[in-house]
Amino acid sequence: MKRMKLGVIGGSGLYEIEGLEGVEEIAVETPFGAPSDRLTTGKLGDAELVFLPRHGRGHRLMPSELPFRANIWALKKLGVDAILAVSAVGSMREEIVPGHLVVVDQFIDRTRHRVDTFFGDGIVGHVHFADPVCAEHADRVHAAAVQAGATVHKGGTYVCMEGPQFSTRAESLLYRSWDVSVIGMTNLQEAKLAREACMCYSTLALATDYDCWHETEDDVSVEAVLQVIRDNVATAKRVILELARGLPERATCACKHALDHAIMTAPDQIPSEAIERLRILLPARFLGQ
C-alpha cells in the first residue's frame, strides 16, 4: 500500500534510523532561496520519508535566520503530504519533566523578525489558523509516541519566542500565567507555512529543561540542553519509525483544502511572476487549468 509521504524537520541525528533504505541527498532550489541544507530521502518499508535538518548540518543557523519558506516549499516540491516537526523546548509546567514529549495543539507568537507567509508581492491570501496543527496527524504522532514507549503529553500550547537568548525570569513567569506548556524558538512559522502549503503539520516537542521560572532548578545552560537532546534522540527515532508504519494511504482532514477559499486577489490581477513563484501551492483555477 502506498502511504502518505512523511517529512521530518529536526536534527540530523534523527535521520540515522535503522531500516531506512535507498538513502539519497537532494539539493532543492526554491523561489525563496536555499533551504537550511540538503534534504535526505529514504524508505522505511513502504513509507517514503524526507528529512530536513532545520538548523543545517552542524547547527549553523539561528532560529531567526531559518529560511522557513524555502524549507516548507522544498518539502512540498518533493511531494511531502504531512510534516512531523521535532523540536527541543523548555518546559513551562511541573508535570512536563525534562525528557518528556509533548504533542502540542496550539501556538502563541512572540517573534518579531520573521517572514511567515508565502503571500505578498501581488497576491493576498488568508488561511484559517484557529487550529494550527492537523488534529488527525497529531493523533497519529501521539499514538506513535505511546507505541514507542515514551512519556508523552497530548495537547498543550507552544509559545514561540524570537531568541536566540533564553527568557528572562519575568518573561518566563508571564508565559506561565498564560497557561502555556512549552517554550521554543522555531515551530510557529513552520506551522503557518505548512497550512498555506496545504500540508498536514504536527510538532513533537522534546522537553529538555525547565525554563528559568523553575527557581529550584539551575538556569538553562546550552550544555544541559544538549545532553537531554542527546538522550532523547533514540526516543524520537522510535516515534518516527512507529509513525511511518502507521501512515494511511491518504488524509481525510481539511488541510489539503486550506487554500480553496483563502486567496482574495482576483485571478486576472495576480502578476505572472507570483503565479510562477507559488505554482506548486495554488489551486488549479489560478493556473488556467
Image (cartoon, rainbow, N blue to C red):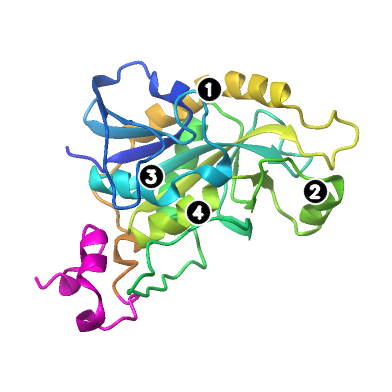
Q: Residue furthest right?
A: 216
Q: Residue at x 70, y 38 (%)?
A: 90
Between the C-alphas of marks 3 and 4, the distance is 11 Å
Tell me the quarter of the picture where residue 74 sits.
top left
Q: Residue at x 34, y 67 (%)?
A: 258
- Residue 278: x and y in percent read 26, 61
> Toward the viewer: 73 or 204?
73
Residue placed under numbered mark 1 in the picture: 233
Lower position in the chain sequence, tag 1 or tag 3: 3
Quarter the N terminus occupies: top left
Tag 1 near tag 3, CB within 8 Å: no
Lower position in the chain sequence, tag 3 or tag 4: 3
Residue placed under numbered mark 2 in the picture: 172
Q: Which mark is residue 189?
A: 4
Tag 1 near tag 2, CB within 8 Å: no
Between the C-alphas of marks 2 and 3, the distance is 29 Å
Image depth: mark 1 or mark 4 in front: 4
